Image: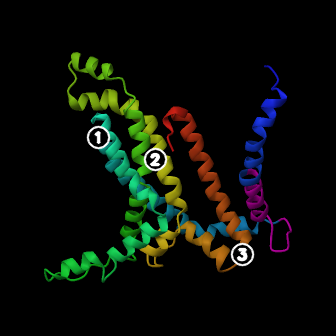
């Protein structure tokens, strides 16, 4: 292989510097704090304490998995229909998908908290028909709903990106061979769209499992996820070492997810 020229090395220097400052160094700091105590001495105590958060990890993975599966069920047919529309309709539908993302996640979540609370819009509407107010805030369902609402664009866009590139001649060939709509979906569309599905699944699951603001607001402080545990150790207990060890586990989960994406999805299929 040819050696890179001096100009090429200079052109790549800003990216190398950026990666070192904002990726490598922060990860190294997390690893350092995870394996040291408050005095800076090497210790496995923080790793041993992770056993106390086993239930928190399980709940985080469970809620995130449920939210991701529901998001997939909603997003897949929507992305399929969007890929079948005209170019003008696709642009409008894409704008509608991205429109909520123009607002900050905190604002979107806080808005739903006002809608779902006891004196919110939904319960006020139900009271007009004599229905008792529903308890929605402070439930697992509200937390899962918040995950779905906030992260559904990350599922729709990769799937749509892949489906829009499926060669129509393949579908026509399937029809010529006697395939009906269900058979085309099972034998052609679903296999070809799997890279987008895997990409979307990963990009929804990873932020869901690490979220803390959604669970704080929509969970009413009654739902503890691993992101909440990390935030509490960092902001309340000031136990940076334990917080770093919890963060290290999430880093490993994210790395595994990225390996899965690189294994099953090509670079062209990752839109976000």
Location of the N terminus by quadrant is: top right
Along the line of sight, which residue is nearer the eye, 48 or 162? 162
Residue 157: x and y in percent read 42, 44
Image point (37%, 69%), residue name: 142
Q: Is residue 30 magenta?
A: yes
- In the rendered view, would you say 74 is above or below 47? above
The alpha-carbon separation of the residues under discs 1 and 3 comes to 52 Å
Q: Residues within 10 Å of mark 1 (few under 14, many from 20)?
A: few
Sequence-wise first label, 1 or 3: 1
Q: Secondary structure at mark 2?
A: helix
Find residue 186 and report its image quarter. Answer: top left
Mark 2 lies on residue:
201
Residue 3: x and y in percent read 82, 23
Mark 3 lies on residue:
239
Q: Between label 1 and label 3, give the one nearer the viewer.
A: 1
Range covered by the magenta-colored residues: 24-42
Q: Residues within 10 Å of mark 2 (few under 14, many from 20)?
A: many
Residue at the extreme left of the image, as rendered: 129
- In the rendered view, would you say 73 is above or below 226? above
- In the rendered view, would you say 159 is above or below 149? above
Q: Is residue 173 magenta?
A: no
Mark 1 lies on residue:
89
Image point (61%, 57%), residue name: 250
Sequence-wise first label, 2 or 3: 2
Sequence-wise first label, 1 or 2: 1
Residue 178: x and y in percent read 20, 19
Q: Secondary structure at mark 1?
A: helix
């Amino acid at each position: 292989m040819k050696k890179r020229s001096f100009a090429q090395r200079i052109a790549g220097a800003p990216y190398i510097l950026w990666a070192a400052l904002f990726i490598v160094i922060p990860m190294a700091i997390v690893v350092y704090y995870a394996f040291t105590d408050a005095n800076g001495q090497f210790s496995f105590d923080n790793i041993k304490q992770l056993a106390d958060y086993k239930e928190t990890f399980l709940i985080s993975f469970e809620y995130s998995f449920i939210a991701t599966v529901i998001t997939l069920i909603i997003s897949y047919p929507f992305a399929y229909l969007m890929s079948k529309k005209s170019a003008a309709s696709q642009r409008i539908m894409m704008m509608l998908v991205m429109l909520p993302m123009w607002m900050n996640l905190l604002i979107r979540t806080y808005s739903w908290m006002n809608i779902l609370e006891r004196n919110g819009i939904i319960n006020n509407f139900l009271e007009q028909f004599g229905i008792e107010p529903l308890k929605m805030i402070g439930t697992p369902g509200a937390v899962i709903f918040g995950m779905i609402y906030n992260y559904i664009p990350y599922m729709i866009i990769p799937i749509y990106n892949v489906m829009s590139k499926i060669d129509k001649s393949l579908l026509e060939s399937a029809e010529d061979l006697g395939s009906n709509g269900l058979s085309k979906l099972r034998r052609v569309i679903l296999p070809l769209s799997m890279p987008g599905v895997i990409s979307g699944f990963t990009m929804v699951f990873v932020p869901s499992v690490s979220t803390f603001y959604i669970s704080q607001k929509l969970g009413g402080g009654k739902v503890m996820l691993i992101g909440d545990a990390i935030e509490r150790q960092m902001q309340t207990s000031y136990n940076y070492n334990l917080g770093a060890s919890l963060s290290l586990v999430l880093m490993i989960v994210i790395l595994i997810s990225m390996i899965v994406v690189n294994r099953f999805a090509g670079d062209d299929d990752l839109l976000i």
